[in-house]
């Protein structure tokens, strides 16, 4: 079983000037990269998306060398998340496990820093800290994961600095990863990785990413910067009405091992104001005391993970020795106070930020961030049903397969499980929060089976187990670890490869190899060649097939062997034009016989005279060049070569371009038109 982990949410919202935008809680799809890491645990987190729920990106480490992201993978078990998850492609799904529990936490901690800034610790303690400098927000497992934040003075409506501070940059790293830093400069985010400005980020589409050491960086659908760490931690920075926000996800492995401005994550607010030396400030401390406590978390130059460029650590620390934050809400201008009240109502944080900055817009952004935090907190309490069941099924055609799964609601509400799609031969039975599928498996091509679990509040979880289908025949063995050729690795229905028993071939072992089994009836000098559904016999090199198609002979059928060659005389109804005669001979691997040798011609004449053939092509013509007689093998008839022309030799001025041996001339040669149909002799090489 693959372990799942609860995520802690750490959301940092701070006010800063810039362009207006409306952030959404982003649940991007996933992508992947290659690694040689072995399988480890996986982390998931449920999060609200437009009134529904989805699961955020988390890392799998695949045993077979691929490093995947669960963003798109977990769409299989989340509540209609496709529109919210960005439509990103999925680069693979882990196949080294067969069972998975999808577990959304019933308690998800959310921490906000918004405005001047107002914070909520991981355990839920609200407080205000408006320090000026660089601070440790989260230090998990003694530096295993660090998040540091930088603040600067806010700009008032008059364009001058105020005594309020705002978040201006965030840096993060794990003990093995690249350093990631995001600054808001000139109204836009600038990404730095390992002390290097990374402008490539600005050109990323919402479903693209940049890969660095143990961290992947992508752009959210709202233009946010998303950093995914292999440890399971995740950092996202976005804007809301010009307010930069940072949201940090922590895997539950970090629970009980955090410190910094976000407090100690252990479910107890009484120790959230723990100092670096381990002593604890009372949770009922005044704002002045909390400010003094927060200053203890200002990072030293040695502790800082920020990149300073052409600036230094000193430029961001002790910037104004006379600086003292404002702890009370006061308005010197009654008209401005009324304007702020009109926007903020009785919202304490909104009024405070408006008063110290002189800017109602910043106060409004603070109030909106606070309202968003409340909304997310309320939505997180209401999760869709949790499905526990196999994520991957090994199914074999011809067998009866059974599997079960269950669905529960964190609030204990009733759950209804419905089969949305079932394959042929499958039956579905649901009893309470448990369902069972019995499948008499037949070969099919889809669609994939799917199920929904819906609670009484109408929240639905979709469950699509991945089917690995075995179609092996004839005692072939299923290889569920290997896909058949052409199968989609990320498909919901995937056909697997087969290992065939002896003498069986084909993708699914559907063909019997008679040749390998020795059950063929190919004869002497023939070789068996396997075909799908049968076989055929082919002659060994140099041999010729018999009419039965199963045995072979040393000469073509109808030919006679003489020394190293095979011969056949074609006459009577089989007479051909000169070109037709050559084609017949060439089909049997030879050519027309050439009357070039005096001794051979003498023997041939005696044979022909006894058989009575009237006229025979001799393999000689001047069709290509009038007057130049050329043998069928391309050799030119020379002046010193053997000739046997009749008393009527070629005139080389007419259309008589092919030579025959005529019986009336005792088989001496005579030129005639090549279109005449005459007897001929074929010669082919004899098999060795």
Image: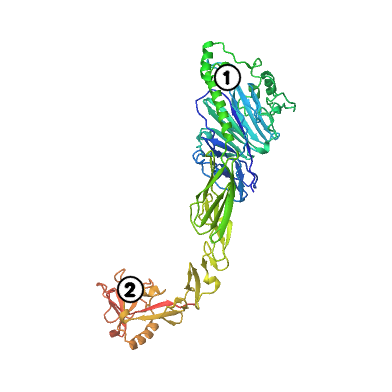
Q: How many other residues sit within 10 Å of disc 1, few (<14), some (14-19) or many (≥20)? A: many
Q: Residue 439, position in %: x, y?
A: 54, 57
Q: Secondary structure at mark 2?
A: helix
Of 115 and 142, the residue lying toward us: 115
User: Which disc number belongs to residue 353?
Assistant: 1
Disc assigned to residue 580: 2
Relative to residue 502, is residue 295 depicted above or below?
Answer: above
> In the rendered view, does 554 fall on the left or right side of 140?
left
Which of the pair 201/512 is nearer the observer?
512
Residue 548 point in image, percent of width and height: 44, 78
Name the secondary structure under disc 1: helix
Mark 2 or mark 1: whose residue is earlier in sequence: 1
Q: Is residue 124 visible?
A: yes
Image coordinates for residue 77, horizontal then vertical, percent: 55, 44
Left or right placement of residue 35 versus residue 450 in this view: right
Q: Nearer the viewer, residue 337 or 13?
A: 337
User: Would you place residue 307 above or below residue 503 in this image?
Assistant: above
- Between the residue at mark 2 and the residue at mark 1, the CA separation in whole angstroms equals 104 Å
Outermost left residue: 654
């Amino acid at each position: 079983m693959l372990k799942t982990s609860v995520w802690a949410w750490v959301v940092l919202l701070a006010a800063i000037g810039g362009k207006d935008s409306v952030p959404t809680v982003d649940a991007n799809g996933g992508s992947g990269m290659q690694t040689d890491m072995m399988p480890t645990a996986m982390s998931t987190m449920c999060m609200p998306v437009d009134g529904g729920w989805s699961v955020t990106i988390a890392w799998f480490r695949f045993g077979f060398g691929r490093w995947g992201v669960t963003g798109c993978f977990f769409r299989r078990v989340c509540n209609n998340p496709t529109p919210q998850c960005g439509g990103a492609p999925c680069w693979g799904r882990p196949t080294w496990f067969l069972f998975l529990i999808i577990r959304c936490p019933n308690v998800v901690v959310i921490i906000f820093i918004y405005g001047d800034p107002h914070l909520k610790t991981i355990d839920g303690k609200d407080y205000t800290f408006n320090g000026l400098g660089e601070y440790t927000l989260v230090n998990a497992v003694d530096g295993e994961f660090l998040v540091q934040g930088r603040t600067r003075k806010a700009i008032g409506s008059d364009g001058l600095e105020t005594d309020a501070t705002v978040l201006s940059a965030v840096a993060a790293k794990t003990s093995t990863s690249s350093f990631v830093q995001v600054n808001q400069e000139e109204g836009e985010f600038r990404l730095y990785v390992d002390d290097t400005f990374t402008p490539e980020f600005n050109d990323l589409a919402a479903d693209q990413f940049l890969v660095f050491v143990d961290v992947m960086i992508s752009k959210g659908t709202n233009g946010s910067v998303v950093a995914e760490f292999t440890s399971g931690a995740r950092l996202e920075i976005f804007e809301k009405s010009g307010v930069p926000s940072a949201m940090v996800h922590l895997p539950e492995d970090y629970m009980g091992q955090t410190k910094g401005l976000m407090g100690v994550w252990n479910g107890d607010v009484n120790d959230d104001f723990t100092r670096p030396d381990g002593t604890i400030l009372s949770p009922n401390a005044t704002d002045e005391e909390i400010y003094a406590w927060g200053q203890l978390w200002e990072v030293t130059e040695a502790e800082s993970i920020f990149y300073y460029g052409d600036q230094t650590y000193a430029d961001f620390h002790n910037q104004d020795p006379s600086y003292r934050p404002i702890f009370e809400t006061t308005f010197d201008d009654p008209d401005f106070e009324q304007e702020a009240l009109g926007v903020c109502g009785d919202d304490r944080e909104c009024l405070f930020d408006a008063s110290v900055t002189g800017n109602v817009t910043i106060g409004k952004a603070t109030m909106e961030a606070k309202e968003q935090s409340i909304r997310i907190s309320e939505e997180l309490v209401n999760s869709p049903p949790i499905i526990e069941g196999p994520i991957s099924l090994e199914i074999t055609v011809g067998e009866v397969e059974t599997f079960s799964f269950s669905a529960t609601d964190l609030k204990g509400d009733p759950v209804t499980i419905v089969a949305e799609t079932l394959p042929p031969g499958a039956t579905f039975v649901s009893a309470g929060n448990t369902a069972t599928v019995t499948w008499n498996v037949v070969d099919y091509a889809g669609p994939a089976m799917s199920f929904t679990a819906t609670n009484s509040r109408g929240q639905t979880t979709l469950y699509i187990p991945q089917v690995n289908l075995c179609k092996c025949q004839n005692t072939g063995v299923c290889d569920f670890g290997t896909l058949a050729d052409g199968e989609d690795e990320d498909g919901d229905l995937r056909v697997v490869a087969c290992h065939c028993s002896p003498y069986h071939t084909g993708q699914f072992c559907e063909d019997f190899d008679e040749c390998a089994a020795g059950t063929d009836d190919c004869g002497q000098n023939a070789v068996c060649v396997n075909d799908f559904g049968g076989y055929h016999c082919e002659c060994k090199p140099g041999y010729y097939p018999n009419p039965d198609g199963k045995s072979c002979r040393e000469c073509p059928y109808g030919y006679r062997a003489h020394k190293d060659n095979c011969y056949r005389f074609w006459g009577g109804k089989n007479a051909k034009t000169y070109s037709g005669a050559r084609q017949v001979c060439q089909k049997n691997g030879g050519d027309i016989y050439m009357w070039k040798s005096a001794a051979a011609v003498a023997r041939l004449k005696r044979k022909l005279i006894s058989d009575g053939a009237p006229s025979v092509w001799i393999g000689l013509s001047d069709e290509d060049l009038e007057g130049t007689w050329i043998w069928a093998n391309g050799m030119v008839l020379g002046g010193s070569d053997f000739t046997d022309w009749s008393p009527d030799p070629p005139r080389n001025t007419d259309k008589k371009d092919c030579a025959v041996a005529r019986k009336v001339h005792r088989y001496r040669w005579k030129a005639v038109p090549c279109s005449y149909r005459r007897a001929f002799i074929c010669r082919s090489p004899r098999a060795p």
